[in-house]
Image (cartoon, helix red, strand yellow):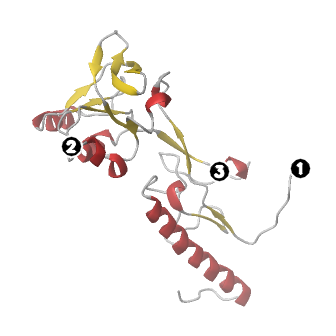
Amino acid sequence: SSDVEIVARRVLIAAGLTEELPPFPMIRAYYGTALHSCVECDGFEKTDKPLALIGETSDLFARALLISRFSSDLIVFTNGADTIRPQQETELASIGIRVERRPIDDIVGEKADMTGVRLADGEVIARVGGFVRPRWHASVDYFGDLEIERDDWGLVRVDERGETSIRGVYAAGDTVPPGPQQLIIAAGNGASVAAKLNMDMIRGALGVGQVDE
């Protein structure tokens, strides 16, 4: 279809995030069934099962603690990344959680059932499911040369009103810190920012500096 040019006084970014899973050939085969990204959403169904937590981000320690509420049979796989500090590893070990730092080759299974994590050295560690920490990317490439300020995770920075570093451009939902949360939280954030955006337009139309909200 042809490009459409739209002129607007204000813009609200609510495009969410795109996820980048670790590049293991079979991870998509088990993602959404044996492997999940949301502990709060799918943790209960994994109660007391032998689980894996796979990721390379700095929040692995906190996520491991969350998962431990559902199962103490947990191994954290860092895929060679240095994201678990020695003190954190000691704390996890004290509650029976092991940290596996060797690189991963792939996820293995029998048909639809995940059976383990195969390391690069060939060893297979038996696991029936668990959680993976994707890397998330804010979907704002359509802004072209307009540079929007982001944080270290690539999420769009906003002020207390939801406005980005570009005047008149707002953002809400998972695309802003702290990132992925439950849908109801993202939707609520969108409603709150939309109200502030509307007041901003009224303020501009009236030519006043501030309108009580």
Disc 2 marks a residue whose amino acid type is Ser
Q: Is residue 3 visible?
A: yes
Disc 3 marks a residue whose amino acid type is Val
Q: CA distance from mark 1 to mark 3?
A: 20 Å
- Image coordinates of residue 16 in percent, x first then y, are 56, 53
Mark earlier in primary sequence (2, 3): 2
Task: Indicate which disc residue 68 carries.
Answer: 2
Is residue 192 toward the left or the right of residue 120 in the image? right
Q: Residue at x 41, y 42 (%)?
A: 37
Location of mark 1 (residue): 2
> Would you place residue 203 above or below residue 79 in this image?
below
Is residue 129 toward the left or the right of residue 205 in the image? left
- Image coordinates of residue 87 in percent, x first then y, are 18, 36
Q: Is residue 145 visible?
A: no
Circle 3 SS class: loop
> Would you place residue 5 above or below residue 47 in this image?
below
Q: Residue at x 67, y 69 (%)?
A: 168
Task: Indicate which disc residue 140 carries.
Answer: 3
